[in-house]
């Protein structure tokens, strides 16, 4: 039985994880949760999972007297403290954004199994995380459907037979629009994803395809794969989550419905979830699906991400910090949708790089990027 600390229990991935824990109480004991700002969800979760002994929220709540057997954590250091204090085997990081980086590093330093859906941990801190893993600190299991798909496919082949990784993307809310047509799109338009039901941040990242650039960076770090041998392909149905192109010209792919319960289970059960292997000599052979060559001009965010990774140093931290701030400003209707890529590129061009940064330097770079974007928009 795994004792699990769930970070981000109130979010989309967290709520689906709770479904899995509720259905299999013999395999998992939920010992702690974090809920960020959504403190109203605490009582119901504690009622469903009396095994929970610790809870984190950003601000102090009125629930402490109601749950005397539960320890409550708050504030800037609370996320790290709840991990350090928790009697758990596994930390599931389902947080959204840069706030997930320090918890991921803390979990590995505490030698926990890290089930990771927080993209930003690897985008911003991939070098630090891989060094911790190489030094024997903890282990990491991805939750993103694309990277679970790649893990499944890699388990079926010899790495030396693989020519490239193929990561699919739906194209997001505006996949049928030209760049010129993006000029007047609204926040409401952007939040209507054609196939996935997700939080606001990731839905906007899907519309810009910034999330796909992040996933390319994640794949690079997770599988030690050359960045130039990772390709993005548009796939409108979202059934083929990723694929490998082999050197003999055939493909091996992971095909399933666009539902995160499967990828989450694959991570939580530590790769023991059932899979069935199907091979084909073309992507079309896997079903009545549609694939389209990725257009870097239509979706420049992916190239922006790849270039940031190639520059290295603090550039990925600048990339992410600027993007988070820009998405927030767009959601508040302070900038246009097409301005997101613009201000991210400007931040990358204007903030000097630091090679082999420490964690503190990455934290500073994140703040610099956000400040740059706010200042630029205000001016």
Image: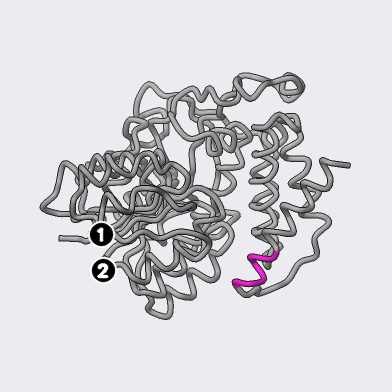
Cβ atoms at labels 1 and 2 below 8 Å apart: yes
Rendered location of residue 6, percent (x, y): 33, 53
Instruction: Indicate left or right for 42 with 185 as reference.
Output: left
Can you say which quadrant of the picture contains the C terminus?
top right
Visible in this render: residue 367? yes
Q: How is the image coloured?
A: one colour
Q: Looking at the image, is mark 1 or mark 2 earlier in the sequence?
A: 1
Can you say which quadrant of the picture contains the N terminus?
bottom left
Instruction: Indicate left or right for 254 with 309 as reference.
Output: left
Element at badge 2? loop
Of residues 41 and 291, the one drawn nearer to the viewer in this rendering: 41
Of residues 350 and 372, the one drawn nearer to the viewer in this rendering: 372
Of residues 231 and 99, the one drawn nearer to the viewer in this rendering: 99
Give the magenta part as a residue range: 359-364
Element at badge 1? loop
Look at mark 2 in the image and give the residue it sits on: 87
Q: Quadrant of residue 354?
A: bottom right
Q: Quadrant of residue 78?
A: bottom left
Around disc 1, counting alpha carbons within 10 Å, would you say few (fewer than 14), some (14 to 19), or many (20 or more)? many
Against 204, residue 105 (above or below) is below
Q: Which residue is farthest front?
A: 65
Look at mark 1 in the image and give the residue it sits on: 53
Instruction: Indicate left or right for 161 with 297 as reference.
Output: left
Magenta run includes residue 38: no
Q: Residue at x 38, y 76 (%)?
A: 137
**1 or 2: mark nearer the eye:** 1
């Amino acid at each position: 039985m795994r004792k699990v600390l769930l970070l981000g229990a109130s979010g989309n991935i967290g709520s689906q994880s709770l479904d899995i824990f509720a259905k299999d109480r013999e395999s998992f004991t939920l010992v702690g949760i974090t809920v960020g700002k959504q403190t109203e969800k605490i009582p119901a979760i504690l009622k469903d999972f009396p095994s929970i002994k610790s809870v984190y929220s950003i601000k102090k709540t009125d629930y402490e007297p109601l749950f005397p057997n539960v320890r409550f954590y708050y504030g800037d250091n609370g996320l790290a403290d709840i991990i350090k204090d928790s009697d758990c085997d596994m930390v599931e990081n389902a947080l959204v954004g840069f706030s997930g980086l320090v918890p991921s590093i803390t979990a590995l330093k505490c030698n926990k199994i890290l089930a990771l859906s927080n993209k930003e941990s690897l985008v911003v801190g991939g070098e630090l995380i891989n060094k911790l893993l190489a030094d024997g600190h903890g282990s990491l299991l991805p939750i993103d459907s694309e990277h679970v798909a790649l893990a499944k496919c890699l388990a079926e082949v010899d790495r030396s037979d693989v020519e490239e990784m193929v990561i699919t993307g739906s194209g997001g809310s505006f996949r049928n629009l030209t760049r010129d047509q993006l000029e007047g799109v609204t926040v409401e338009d952007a939040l209507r994803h054609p196939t996935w039901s997700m939080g606001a941040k990731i839905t906007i990242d899907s519309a810009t395809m910034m999330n796909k650039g992040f996933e390319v960076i994640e794949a690079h770090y997770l599988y030690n794969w050359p960045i130039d041998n990772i390709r993005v392909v548009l796939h409108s149905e979202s059934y083929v989550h990723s694929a490998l192109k082999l050197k003999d010209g055939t493909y091996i792919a992971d095909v399933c419905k666009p539902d995160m319960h499967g990828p989450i289970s694959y991570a939580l059960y530590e790769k023991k979830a059932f899979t069935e292997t199907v091979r084909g000599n073309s992507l079309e052979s896997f079903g009545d699906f549609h694939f389209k060559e990725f257009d870097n001009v239509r979706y420049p965010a992916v190239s922006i991400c790849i270039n940031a990774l190639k520059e290295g140093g603090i550039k990925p931290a600048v990339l992410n910090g600027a993007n988070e701030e820009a998405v927030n400003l767009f959601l508040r209707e302070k900038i246009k949708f097409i301005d997101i890529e613009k201000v991210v590129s400007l931040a990358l061009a204007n903030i000097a790089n630091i090679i082999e940064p420490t964690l503190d330097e990455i934290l500073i770079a994140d703040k610099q990027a956000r400040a740059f974007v706010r200042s630029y928009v205000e001016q």
